[in-house]
Image: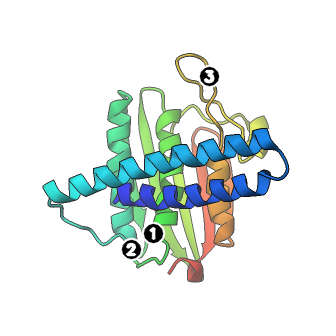
Amino acid sequence: MYLKKSMDHIEQITASSFELYKALKPLDHNLSTKALYISQEIHEVKKDSQRIYSGLSKITTTKNLDAHLVSNLLQYVIQGNKKYSTYLNKNIEFKMTYSSDFYTKEPIALLALLNNLVANAVEAIEEQGSIFISINLQRDETVIEVEDTGVGIPKTMLPVIFDAGYTTKFNDEGKASTGIGLSHVQSIVEKFEGTIVAESDQATKFTITIPTNNLQ
């Protein structure tokens, strides 16, 4: 399912980067050439993903959960991030709760939103801790909360954490990450006409409120 989700995103990115190339071509040769190169490289990733997906489809039989059911989406998020925490050699307890199970018409967007926040929470926990995910229906709104016991966010930085380029992550060579994860989350929330708020004290919590009609 995750591979199919990635393939759909790659297809959109390929088209968008090629449109960028066409828009830049009459304006700036160097920038348009770079945009075309990005489009071509993404196209190669798409083709490789298609080959992998085709091969896996022939050799595996899986139990398909209904991806449109919120409870199953939460299972996908927790299972994937448990493996991620193990890969990072961290001991993390995952907890989830939901007030009412329901079918969503936006499973891919919800997966992207939840995975970004939960993966960030995994990375924020140094060695061991806990992550709590909840989805609750409150009147005509759906409230999503992701809370972790990680290192926290300095209060002075809370106003800018959703800005594209903001990051506290660096690789082993000291190179900063792109810092687009939270800005991407905010874009998804805004697409649903919702709001997202972050608070950080002894724990860090992201609270998202979305009109339920935009999800169901």
In-front residue for pair 44/11: 44
Q: Are marks 1 and 2 in contact (CB under 8 Å)?
A: yes
- The residue mark sitting in front, 1 or 3, is 3
Residue at 75% x, 37% y is 157
Alpha-carbon distance for marks 1 and 2? 6 Å
Which mark is first along the chain, 3 or 1? 1
Q: Is mark 2 on a helix, strand or loop?
A: loop
Q: Are marks 1 and 3 in contact (CB under 8 Å)?
A: no
User: Which residue is label 2 attached to?
Assistant: 68
When the figure is inspected, residue 97 is found, relative to residue 36, above or below; the finding is below
Residue at 71% x, 48% y is 162
- The residue mark sitting in front, 3 or 2, is 3
User: Which residue is label 1 attached to?
Assistant: 107
Q: Can residue 67 be seen in this view?
A: yes
Q: What element carries label 1?
A: helix
Which mark is first along the chain, 2 or 3? 2
The 10 Å Cα crowd at callout 2, few under 14, some 14 to 19, many 20 or more, is some
Amino acid type at image mark 3: Lys
Say which quadrant the N terminus sits in. bottom left
In-front residue for pair 74/50: 50
In-front residue for pair 57/40: 40
Q: In which quarter of the image is residue 165?
A: top right
Amino acid type at image mark 1: Pro
In-front residue for pair 15/158: 15
Q: In which quarter of the image is residue 214?
A: bottom right
When the figure is inspected, residue 177 is found, relative to residue 20, above or below; the finding is above
Q: Residue furthest right?
A: 27
